[in-house]
Amino acid sequence: MKKLIIILVVLAAIIFGGIAYATSWVDETVTEDALSEAVYDSTGTTEQGMTETAMALFNPTNSDDEYTLVETFINYVIYDSIKQNLNEDYDPLGDCETSECYTIQESRYADVRYAYAHLNDDNQLIVTVSAHRDSYPSFDTAVHLTFDISIEITSADLVLTLQETHLADNLIEESMLDRILGFTDQGAIEDSVTTGTLDLDDKTYTYSFTP
């Protein structure tokens, strides 16, 4: 009996240690401080924000940094898509404290908390989606999608092309990403984007501005 207890203790230690290692491998905490206050605290609608930002982006006389305008525009698109198709109560920078206000979508595996766009030093756009799990094994993590940005002022086209995907700091190979996407309803994901066209086969997002 003593040997059996020792074996069970060792087995439990291995299991719990493995779970701890797995969660630490993907550990990354994202807070609401990462969200754009200009987008989430705007007095106008998301549609107004997208239109005004697109007008500035494709105005050849505009002096604002075009990559910053892309960042703002995509943040409006993300927020509008969440509000329209996923959770109309989502308001993470508001005064509401219910889970519906700061959680994009809940599931038994993990809750999606935040989604936002930001630029890196190479003027690539990174779309970050964070997840949180309270129950055991608890964790915080985030997926980072890095896009090249192509802006055509004359045709008023914006194209984002996916270059890399990371889970926390860990690179996800394209073959693995394709395998994961194969288990999803790609049509539903593409249709959830309210503005522009998301193509998961080509891994691109395209927006054409029409004045």
Image (spheres, rainbow, N blue to C red):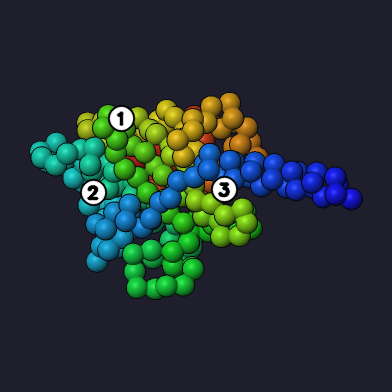
> How packed is label 1: few (under 14 Cα within 10 Å), some, or many (20 or more)?
some
Q: Which residue is at a point 46% across and 50% down the rendered structure image?
A: 130
The residue indicated by pointer 2 is 53
- Specify whether 89 is left or right of 25: left
Q: Please, is residue 148 above or below residue 66 in the view?
A: above
> How packed is label 2: few (under 14 Cα within 10 Å), some, or many (20 or more)?
many
Q: Is residue 122 visible?
A: yes
Q: Which residue is at a point 59% across and 41% down the rendered structure image?
A: 22
The residue indicated by pointer 3 is 188
Q: Distance between the Cα atoms at labels 1 and 3?
A: 25 Å
Q: Please, is residue 96 above or below residue 50 in the view?
A: below
Asked if disc 1 and disc 3 are in contact, CB closer than 8 Å, the reply is no
Which amino acid type corresponds to the residue marked 2 in the rendered image?
Answer: Thr
Q: Distance between the Cα atoms at labels 2 and 1?
A: 16 Å
Query: Residue 34 in the image: x percent, y percent?
Result: 33, 52
Extreme residue in the front direction: 2
The label shown at residue 86 is none
Q: Is residue 209 visible?
A: no
Q: Which of 77 and 134 is in front in this view?
A: 134
Extreme residue in the right direction: 1
The residue indicated by pointer 1 is 150
Q: Which residue is at a point 34% across and 69% down the rendered structure image?
A: 94
First along the sequence among labels 1 and 3: 1
Q: Which residue is at a point 39% across and 34% down the rendered structure image?
A: 146
Asked if disc 2 and disc 3 are in contact, CB closer than 8 Å, the reply is no
Q: Tag 1's secondary structure? A: strand
Which amino acid type corresponds to the residue marked 3 in the rendered image?
Answer: Ala
First along the sequence among labels 2 and 1: 2
Query: Residue 56 in the image: x percent, y percent?
Result: 18, 45
Q: Tag 2's secondary structure? A: helix
